[in-house]
Amino acid sequence: MKVLIENLQSKTAVTDNIKGLLNRVAEMSLEMEGFKTPSEISFLLVDDERIREINKDYRGIDKATDVLSFPIVDMCEGKILSDEGDIDPDENLLILGDIVISLETVIVQAEKYGHSFERELAFLATHGMFHLLGYDHQDESSEKLMLEKQEQVLALMSLSR
């Protein structure tokens, strides 16, 4: 698996620890789902203004949010539904999609919920990963399932509440 991390903000230093955390989230999320297809995932780390612009452009919602996911592969609960998808021709990796996280909002929400920056970042990253894997939270039961999976990954990383 390949994890690309692009820092598009300047308010929060993106350290090797942050990069390692995002890599572990991606690896553990895929491993927990039993997803073995060689894959590529991309994280874009932005500020509130940038995520607001992206949210407006892609969802028509003119406000900042914490995390946005842009799946490329048609999946449902960890299973590929269609053979169509982008393959990185150089490395023969299935490109699962992009996850955009506002580090500005990570800081605010970590303080609001009384936990660490790392726990909040990992929570949002797992949220994005499970969206890429075809999970959603359109109703109460699907939201519960998705949150349970997120919490399982966080527990494996010793970042549970």
Image: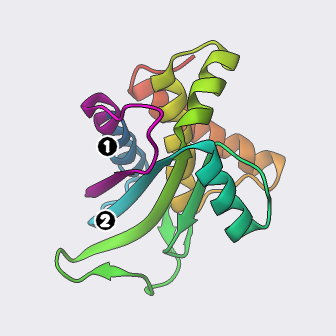
Real-space Cα distance between discs 2 and 1? 12 Å
Residue 77 appears in the picture as rendered: no
x and y percentages locating residue 33 in the rendered image: 44, 51
| Residue underneath mark 2 | 39
| Residue underneath mark 1 | 23
Residue at (63% x, 12% y) in the render: 114
Residue situated in front as seen by the camera: 110 or 74: 110
Earlier in the chain: of badge 2 and badge 1, it is 1
Residue type beneath disc 1 = Asn
Whether residue 18 is in magenta: the answer is yes
Horizontal side of residue 134 vs 34, given as left or right:
right
Reply above or below: 43 against 123: below
- Give the magenta range: 1-20
Residue type beneath disc 2 = Ser
Whether residue 84 is in magenta: the answer is no
Residue at (46% x, 35% y) in the render: 153
x and y percentages locating residue 97 in the rendered image: 46, 66
Q: Residue furthest front?
A: 10
Q: Residue furthest top?
A: 114
Of the 4 image quadrants, the one containing the C terminus is top right
x and y percentages locating residue 92 in the rendered image: 21, 77
Packing grade of label 1 (10 A; few <14, some 14-19, many >=20) is many
